[in-house]
Image (cartoon, rainbow, N blue to C red):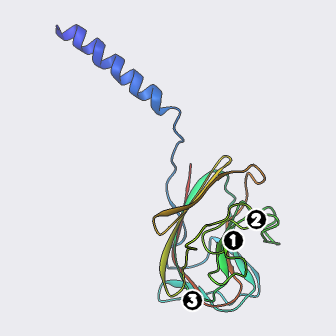
Amino acid sequence: MDRRSALKVSGAVFTLATAGCSSMPAMGRWIPLFDGKGIDAFNAVGNANWRVVDGILESDRGPGFLVSKQSFDNFRIRAEFYANADTNSGIFIRCQDPNKIGAANSYEVNIWDTRKDPTYGTAAIVDFAKVSQPYPKAGGRWNTFEITADGPRLVVVFNGQTTVDIRDTKYARGPIALQSSGGLIRFRRVLVQPI
């Protein structure tokens, strides 16, 4: 094969490769909602006693939320959190009313090991996606959530294990909220990446 033919072939391969990439979602940069310094990206709603202690965001009294000032449609969240065994908390996404957060108007990715119905406990999406036995537990250690909302697809990965992978179109866009509703909850990093 001469040089001119080789260039044509490599150009065709490049065109095919880049054509395939155009169907993949564009990835934005990671935006820190909480990076250990402050809570400027949020508005406080309710009665939680949110505070930053040694670079960690924590609350042990609620009910209350930190609601992102920015709304998101398609995104990934990476959050590192610590919860006591009896903590009731969660990460709410695509919230429809930033002043009235709840499972009735948002997707609630739950953090609640002792929920009466454990199928919607830790790592479930309340009223949308159950978890199965052995039920995930977060109490007494640092954990990681990776939450993806890409169009109708919602995926929750808890400590590296996928617990939810569903399709739902009820909520398309809205802020993100961190919940404190009883028991100690700590976050040391919360990042969001538009996709």
Residue at the spot 46% in from the left edge and 26% down from the top edge: 19
Q: Secondary structure at mark 2?
A: loop
Does the residue at mark 2 contact the one at mark 1 (Cβ under 8 Å)? Answer: yes
Residue at the spot 73% in from the left edge and 60% down from the top edge: 128
Q: Is residue 29 left or right of residue 14?
A: right
Q: What residue is disc 3 on? A: 84
Q: Secondary structure at mark 3?
A: loop
Q: Quadrant of the N terminus?
A: top left
Q: Which label was assigned to residue 120?
A: 1
| Rendered view: 124 above or below 1 | below
Residue at the spot 46% in from the left edge and 33% down from the top edge: 21
Ranked by sequence position, the earlier of labels 3 and 2 is 3
Task: Look at label 2 and name its amino acid.
Answer: Asp
Task: Look at label 1 and name its amino acid.
Answer: Tyr
The residue carrying pointer 2 sits among few (fewer than 14), some (14 to 19) or many (20 or more) residues within 10 Å by Cα, namely few
Question: From this viewpoint, which residue is outermost toward the front?
Answer: 133
Viewer-nearest of discs 3 and 2: 2
Give x and y (percent) for residue 3. 18, 11
